[in-house]
Amino acid sequence: MRCSFHPEREAVAACVECGRGICEECKIELRKRARCPECAQRRSGLITAAGVLNIIGGVFWLITGLIFVALGALFGRAPGAEEPGKAISLVMSVFGGPGLILGGLGIAGGVAALKRRLWGLALAGAILTWNTLSLVFLALRRRDFR
Ligand SMILES: [Zn+2]
Ligand SMILES: [Zn+2]
């Protein structure tokens, strides 16, 4: 078999995605699977998309959490309405705190995906932030992670 990109060279492996022959120079190996440069490119695009989606989702949760915590603090200090204000403040804090944590996890998972590391963290970030699209990409491309 010849290399698909260098017809004059003998192939040393076949791409696991498209099956084309690849020479030593063209071969891109990850987790002991050889890929051609074209498939390696496509592969990284999907996980990069998942990482970006995770970060966007994380930022959304972070902002939502911040708004809730800020509103909670505001209601807690509202003069006059003592009891309802405190109750609203408590509810806001209860929702806001986890929102901040989820946001942080989403962003951490996104960064992990961009680095192709810690697949579990990337997946947890996608699940906890309800990032369905990112979750699908990560589930499909687990083998791209180190
Ligand atoms: Zn290929
Ligand atoms: Zn080649």
Image (tube, rainbow, N blue to C red):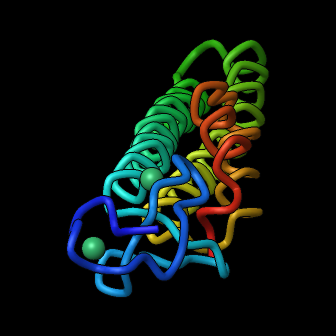
> Could you tell whether 44 is left or right of 88 in the image?
left
x 52%, y 47%: residue: 18
Along the line of sight, the residue nearer the viewer: 122 or 48: 48
x 33%, y 54%: residue: 41
> Could you tell whether 26 is left or right of 99 in the image?
left
x 54%, y 65%: residue: 14
x 45%, y 64%: residue: 21
Along the line of sight, the residue nearer the viewer: 36 or 90: 36
**x and y percent of residue 6 in the render?**
21, 69
Q: Is residue 6 above or below residue 9?
A: above
Q: Is residue 21 above or below residue 125?
A: below
Quadrant observed for ligand 2 in the rendered image = bottom left
Q: Is residue 48 above or below residue 117?
A: above
What is the quadrant of the C terminus in the image?
bottom right
Q: Quadrant of residue 16?
A: bottom right
> Could you tell whether 85 is left or right of 57 in the image?
right
**x and y percent of residue 124 in the render?**
76, 51
**x and y percent of residue 119 in the render?**
69, 64
Along the line of sight, the residue nearer the viewer: 141 or 39: 39
